[in-house]
Image (spheres, rainbow, N blue to C red):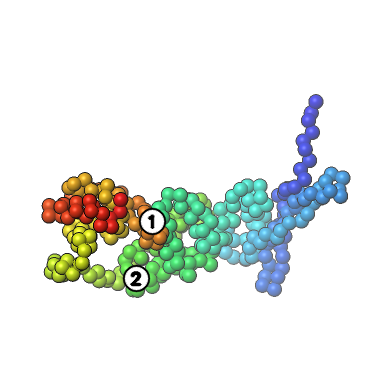
Amino acid sequence: MTLKRPLRTSGPVGDGWVEEVKTSKGSRFVAYWQVYVEDASRPDGRRRKRNGPFELGPKVKLGPEGTLKSLKDARKKWMAICDSVIGRTPTQHPLEMREKTFEWFARNVYQPRRKERWRPRTAEAFEYYMGKLLPTFGSQQIGEITEQQMQRFLNELAPRSSRTIVEHCRMYLGSIFGMAFVRGVVRTNEAADLAIPETRRVFRPFLSLDDYAKLIPQLTSQRDILMGRLLYMCALRRRELFGLKVGDFDGKTIGVERQVSERDGLREAPVKTAASNARVALPTDRVKPFNDVTQTGLGWAK
């Protein structure tokens, strides 16, 4: 006995069709399709409904590969993406994503696939550099952004920014377009050969030995003196210093295992790099003061 399949009462019907629609700005190709919707008033509990439109693009007489010169070209494009458009596949087809904006791709494809491996600081950095990139590229179709546009952006950014900022903007452009290229969204990785232009020089003041000798007598507590000496003599980052606990001291060295994140409400976070997670030897004259501070509990974290 052959079992009868249950009647489908919802979902797409067939592959749809393409029409050429004339507008005041020229002809455009538009796709439509039918879907079943539930309808209790019908004997079979369903009826057909026209869905769409989905715009495939304008009709052009001349253009590069991929432009729509005829109804045949439009139908070919529609058959490549129709499953994702009408909901038969969970993800969008690369041809469909090619017409999305740079911001859409960065937020909906790149960020979700990368954020699982990011540390909290990396997620913050991504948002910071998106603030640099989106005003220029955010509303542009990702498939239309050129190497020349991106290089011009870096060249204009360089005179007013540090090398670190320019390098990170190039890195995110390269990473986003690299993912788009691997997934077939763009035909070439336009960001692959971007160059770092000359950036403004950043003056980073530092504390000389004479300045350090003048600073220490101005500190009012044993804890502050010790903190000042650790920062200067042991080259700790201030976030690493504030993340130290009593148990990190073994009598001769301190273990740098964590830092305090100011942006996360002074919560603990991993150190900046794997190489930062290490033990730092204390100068001989600092061992006793450190012992005094930790044993008397002068505000040091347990």
Disc assigned to residue 197: none
Characterize the local packing of mark 2: few (<14), some (14-19) or many (20 or more) Cα atoms within 10 angstroms.
some
User: Do the residues under discs 1 and 2 have CB atoms within 8 angstroms?
Assistant: no
Using residue 212 as the reference point, say whether residue 9 is left or right of it: right
| Residue 219 to residue 49: above or below | below
Q: Which residue is mark 1?
A: 267
| Residue at figure coordinates x 46%, y 52% from the top left | 115
| Residue at figure coordinates x 41%, y 55% from the top left | 120
Q: Nearer the viewer, residue 110 or 277?
A: 277
Residue at the far top in the pictured view? 1
| Residue at figure coordinates x 36%, y 54% from the top left | 268
Whether residue 28 is visible: yes
Alpha-carbon span between mark 1 and mark 2: 30 Å
Q: Which residue is mark 2?
A: 161
Q: Nearer the viewer, residue 222 or 63?
A: 222
Give residue 267's position: percent from left, percent from top. 38, 56
Give residue 300's position: percent from left, percent from top. 28, 55
State which quadrant residue 17 falls in. Answer: bottom right
Using residue 108 as the reference point, say whether residue 30 is left or right of it: right
Characterize the local packing of mark 1: few (<14), some (14-19) or many (20 or more) Cα atoms within 10 angstroms.
few
Dot 1 lies on which element?
A: strand
Assign the N terminus to one quadrant of the image. top right
Which comes before the other along the chain, label 1 or label 2?
2
Q: Nearer the viewer, residue 30 or 63?
A: 30
Using residue 25 as the reference point, say whether residue 65 is left or right of it: left
- Residue type beneath disc 1: Arg
Give residue 39's position: percent from left, percent from top. 82, 50
Give residue 207's position: percent from left, percent from top. 19, 68
